[in-house]
Amino acid sequence: MKRLTLWVALLFSASLWAGNYTVDASHSNVGFKIKHLMISNVKGGFDRFEGVFEYDEKSKTLKSMEGNISVDSINTANAKRDDHLKNEDFFDVKKYPHIAFKLTKVEGDKVTGTLTMHGVSKEITLELENNGVIQDPWGNTRVGLSLSGTINRYDFGLKYNKVLEAGGLTIGEEVKLEIELEGILDKA
């Protein structure tokens, strides 16, 4: 009987280390960069996003994650370009107002999940950098995570482009994702 009680106690205490975190958007960033005229990169990001994740503090492991981005919050520091990105040539925000991600697997420093953008859902794999856990000065437990990787925008139906006179395309196909997340432990 003592062994059963010990096993139950161990199982219960292990679950105490895992916590649910809400992404602190004021200390997080969902960014990207893409080739322009094949010679430089244009950087941008999204100003409005939300997400939650489960993180096991004891094993320092990400267990689950879901996020949602408001596409009309795209910001490349150029209003004319942002308006073009929001129209039917690119994101078509009236028809597809959100981008979503749902984690399906974590293997070491790689995370795999379903990215839904422009009405298309595809499995993608990103590099994970686990930046650890800290207690902030206000008594909150915080976790920092970085995600990075590359997707092909054509895979998601974002195919607008123009051919340059000298050859090549105006906009690259590959989009590099650069995501910094800081989560605050939900106090239940």
Image (cartoon, rainbow, N blue to C red):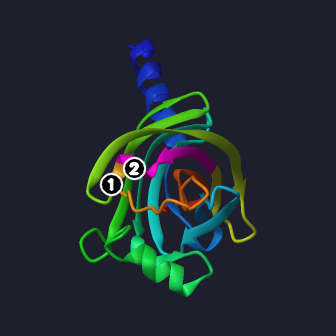
Q: Which numbered tag is attached to residue 127?
A: none
Q: Are marks 1 and 2 in contact (CB under 8 Å)?
A: yes
Q: Picture coordinates of residue 133 (x, y %)?
A: 68, 49
- Number of other residues with Cα within 10 Å of mark 1, as a class: few under 14, some 14 to 19, many 20 or more: some
Specify whether residue 149 is painted magenta: yes
Q: Give the residue type that dot 2 points to.
A: Tyr
The residue under label 2 is: 154
- Number of other residues with Cα within 10 Å of mark 2, as a class: few under 14, some 14 to 19, many 20 or more: few
Highlighted range, magenta: 146-155
Q: Residue at x 50, y 42 (%)?
A: 16
Tag 1, which secondary structure?
Answer: loop
Q: Which numbered tag is attached to residue 157?
A: 1
Q: Give the residue type that dot 1 points to.
A: Gly
Tag 2, which secondary structure?
Answer: helix
Q: Give the quadrant of the C terminus.
A: bottom left
Specify whether residue 137 is painted magenta: no
Question: As drawn, which residue projects farthest toward the bottom?
Answer: 79
Q: Residue at x 47, y 51 (%)?
A: 53
Q: Picture coordinates of residue 153 (x, y %)?
A: 43, 52
> Between residues 150 and 115, which one lies in front from this camera angle?
150
The main secondary structure of the magenta stretch is strand
Q: Residue at x 38, y 67 (%)?
A: 90
* Whether residue 28 is situated above or below residue 148 in the rendered picture: below
Q: Residue at x 66, y 53 (%)?
A: 144
Looking at the image, residue 63 sits to the left or right of residue 135; the answer is: left
Q: Picture coordinates of residue 61 (x, y %)?
A: 57, 36
State the image quarter where residue 118 is shown: bottom left
Looking at the image, residue 110 sits to the left or right of residue 38; the answer is: left
